[in-house]
Image (cartoon, helix red, strand yellow):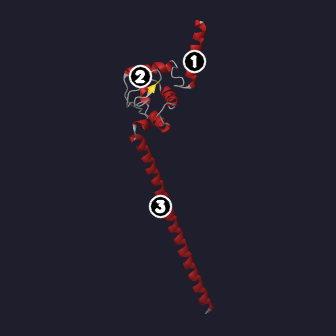
Amino acid sequence: MRKKKREKEREKERERERERKKEKERERERNKEREKEIERERERERERERMHYRNASPRLCGLNVGLKVQRGVEIAAGVPIASALDSVHADRHRAVLVRLHRLEGVRKPALRLAAEHAWHGTLSMWAKGVWGSRLRAGWLGRVGGTKVKENRKREKDRKRERDR
């Protein structure tokens, strides 16, 4: 009698154990599914962001409309900043992009985007030439930065001294 009872108890215990294992397995499956869903959501978010920068307003894309670059040199409306330097070496592209971000309306994500597409875009040869020569001469320095202003002041002061 006791033997049978013990046997029944063991059987029940084994049954419970099997149930627990099955439940754990189901839980694992659910977790995997949840992880996959989260990853898909992240990917969708990344894609949305990419499309946002691709379809964004000209200001966001670094397609700065009529952006003035010191002494009246102007990038034509709707021209990617990066492509303004199409004929110049890629490293110089990056240098100028970094310097340009100080100007109004050029945002850093836009610079990243522009750097990625640095070789694409259109701009008249005139503008490319102007930009290229200015760049090689180091003329862009710090675009509109305080250094430029200070140097101009110093030059004016020297001129005044000479004229006296």
Query: Element under label 1?
Result: helix
Marker disc for residue 153: 1
Position above or below: 5 against 154: below
Furthest toward the bottom, the residue is 1
Real-space Cα distance between discs 1 and 3? 67 Å
- Please tell me which residue is depicted at 47% across the width and 23% down the height of the picture: 70
Q: 16 or 30, which lies in front?
A: 30
**What residue did someone put label 3 on?**
33
Real-space Cα distance between discs 2 and 1? 30 Å
Furthest toward the right, the residue is 2
Q: Residues within 10 Å of mark 1 (few under 14, many from 20)?
A: few
For badge 2, the amino acid type reads: Lys
**What residue did someone put label 2 on?**
128
For badge 1, the amino acid type reads: Lys
**Contact (Cβ within 8 Å) of mark 1 with mark 3:** no
Q: Quadrant of the N terminus?
A: bottom right
Q: 31 or 157, which lies in front?
A: 157
Residue 87: x, y in percent?
Answer: 42, 23
Q: 162 or 33, which lies in front?
A: 162
